[in-house]
Image (cartoon, helix red, strand yellow):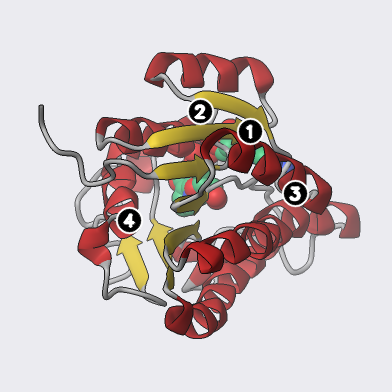
Amino acid sequence: MNMGILDGKVVLVTGAARGQGAAEAKVATEEGATVIVTDVLDEEGQATAKEIGGTYHRLDVSSGAAWRDVAAEVMTAHGRIDGLVNNAGIFKIDGALDHDEDTFRQVIDVNQFGVMHGIKTVSPIMVEQGSGSIVNISSIAGFRGMGALAYSTSKWAVRGMTKVAAKELAPLGVRINSVHPGLIDTDMLGQLGVPIDQMSEAIPMGRPADSMEVAHPVIFLLSDGASYITGTELVVDGGMII
Ligand code: NAD
């Protein structure tokens, strides 16, 4: 039997019903992890979990109470959490002159508070174990004034949060890194309303990423092969922000 880089590990992925989260859940499973698929899309989440042989739990990442419930269920079932991918996110088109407060808050609630709740809920479990790895999915919009106002704000925040948490958690055996995809071919890309050919012109590699091309680097960061990497920013963008 082949050895996987996540053999024996328990990994929770948020927003894993579809898109990049589903790809991360799939690769983690292939690499030997027991995977907890979480999302708010119950039907798609259950189908993804079934396909990979994992379990599905409903988890709205913007709710601290929901995080506590799911973490308790996972601890009862598996007794540990070795990897967390804070992947869930939403995108809304807005700008400096054209945004409304409710939509802004909604994006921050999911993309920023979601990651905060994930860190707050799962890192004490990892600290208790003396080991664990968290990967926060930001974006190249966390490097530039790019994307949209609330979205870019939230993705810069994820990058900052990761660094502060990395310093605090490193002496306690827990690593935490951010991953910054460029354009990935998922449902979210469709929301930009720009044809793929046109977007591809801005990418030196000339095409968006397949979600698997982001999933593999994420899974590497969860693995023991990344044991000396914490607080870093891994850009996966086909050369877009070189
Ligand atoms: P997607 O829309 O296909 O998937 C996002 C998933 O998050 C969905 O399954 C959705 O149901 C889930 N989700 C939304 N709100 C949630 C909530 N409150 N609680 C739990 N789950 C929730 O998009 P994707 O491209 O797979 O996005 C995954 C991550 O990658 C996001 O953080 C996104 O910001 C980031 N990202 C995407 C791109 C891109 O080009 N697609 C680029 C850079 C970063």
The quarter of the displayed image where residue 156 is located: bottom right
Residue 194 visible to the viewer: no
Placement of 207 over or under 45, stated as above or below: below
Q: Label 2, label 3: how many angstroms apart (C-alpha)? A: 23 Å
- Of circles 2 and 3, the one toward us is 3
User: The residue tagged with tag 2: helix, strand or loop?
Assistant: loop
- Mark 1 and 3 residues: CB-CB less than 8 Å, in contact? no
Disc 1 beta carbon < 8 A from ligand 1? yes
Gap between marks 3 and 4 measured at Cα? 41 Å
User: Which label was assigned to residue 202?
Assistant: 4
- The residue that mark 2 highlights is 18
Observer-side mark, 2 or 1, equals: 1
> What is the CA distance from the residue labelled 4 to the residue labelled 2?
26 Å
- Closest to the camera, between mark 4 and mark 2, is 2
Q: Are marks 4 and 2 in contact (CB under 8 Å)?
A: no
Q: Would you say the residues marked 2 and 1 are in contact, meaning their CB atoms lie under 8 Å apart?
A: yes
Q: Earlier in the sequence, mark 4 or mark 2?
A: 2
Residue wearing tag 1: 39
Q: Residues within 10 Å of mark 4 (few under 14, many from 20)?
A: some
